[in-house]
Amino acid sequence: GESVGLHLPTLSVQEGDNSIINCAYSNSASDYFIWYKQESGKGPQFIIDIRSNMDKRQGQRVTVLLNKTVKHLSLQIAATQPGDSAVYFCAETTNAGKSTFGDGTTLTVKP
Amino acid sequence: GAVVSQHPSWVICKSGTSVKIECRSLDFQATTMFWYRQFPKQSLMLMATSNEGSKATYEQGVEKDKFLINHASLTLSTLTVTSAHPEDSSFYICSARDLQGTDEQYFGPGTRLTVT
């Protein structure tokens, strides 16, 4: 069946370093992807999105890369801060707004 | 920005009772809302799509008679967990899609349900 998964369940980085979180998806027909950040006990928070007609999109300190050839998505966080510590999910979203979430990567930022 | 609220934020109930969770879009209208369930250290799993004025669409494996969804207005959807059991204990999260806006979904803060 269709699924969205993450390569690594945990990631630990030093404050100030760059972080890269990866995601693999299996539905080649997917055309919209979103990265979310979820802090403990809270709902997901939108970070950045990308459509399949793009291969890169940049936001404030974040960049999402999409490689449709290998069905891979990544989130890069520049100058990672302690406040970035959270669980990060990629989600594949249909035009109807229905999202399939990956397993999540726990990012821990060490001061 | 768009805000989605949930009420209650947490609830403890006894096995066999029913619990209603509300999801409200505070500053926008949403014809479509989504209900997710998240177990500890797991991902969000879509339970159902709530459509204003019509029946909800449930995902495979989700019992529609157990998880009753009502989307009576463009700003409110409710999820009722009927005859709750300890295995229904979970974090329930809703999201709403802005009728006028982009494809972005706005998530609520979640409701922690504990069934004893």
Image (tube, coloured by chain):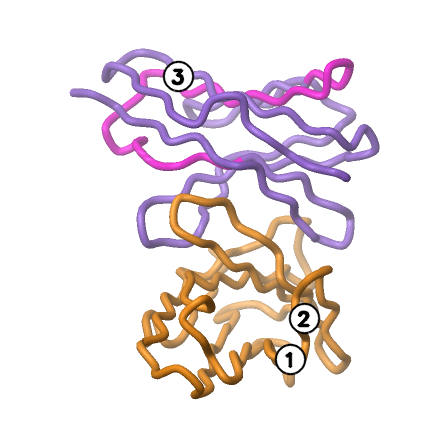
Chain colours: A purple, B orange
Q: Does B48 sit left or right of B28 as displayed?
A: right
Chain at tag 1: B
Residue at the far bottom in the pictured view: B17
C-alpha gap between disc 2 and disc 3: 36 Å
Q: Residue A96 in the image: state x and y as whole percent.
A: 76, 54
Residue A52 is one of the magenta-drawn residues: no
The quadrant the N terminus of chain A occupies is top right
Residue A19 disc label: 3
Residue B50 disc label: 2
Label 1 crowd bin: few (<14), some (14–19), many (20+), radius 10 Å: many
Segment colored magenta: A67-89
Q: Residue A103 in the image: state x and y as whole percent.
A: 52, 37
Q: Specify whether disc 1 shares its chain with disc 2.
A: yes
Chain at tag 3: A
Residue B71 disc label: 1
Residue B90 disc label: none
- Which residue is located at x 36 percent, y 76 percent? B8
- Which image quadrant is residue A32 in? top right
- SS at mark 2 in the image: strand
Q: Nearer the viewer, residue A6 or B7?
A: A6
- Which residue is located at x 41 percent, y 22 percent? A61
Residue at the far left in the pictured view: A111
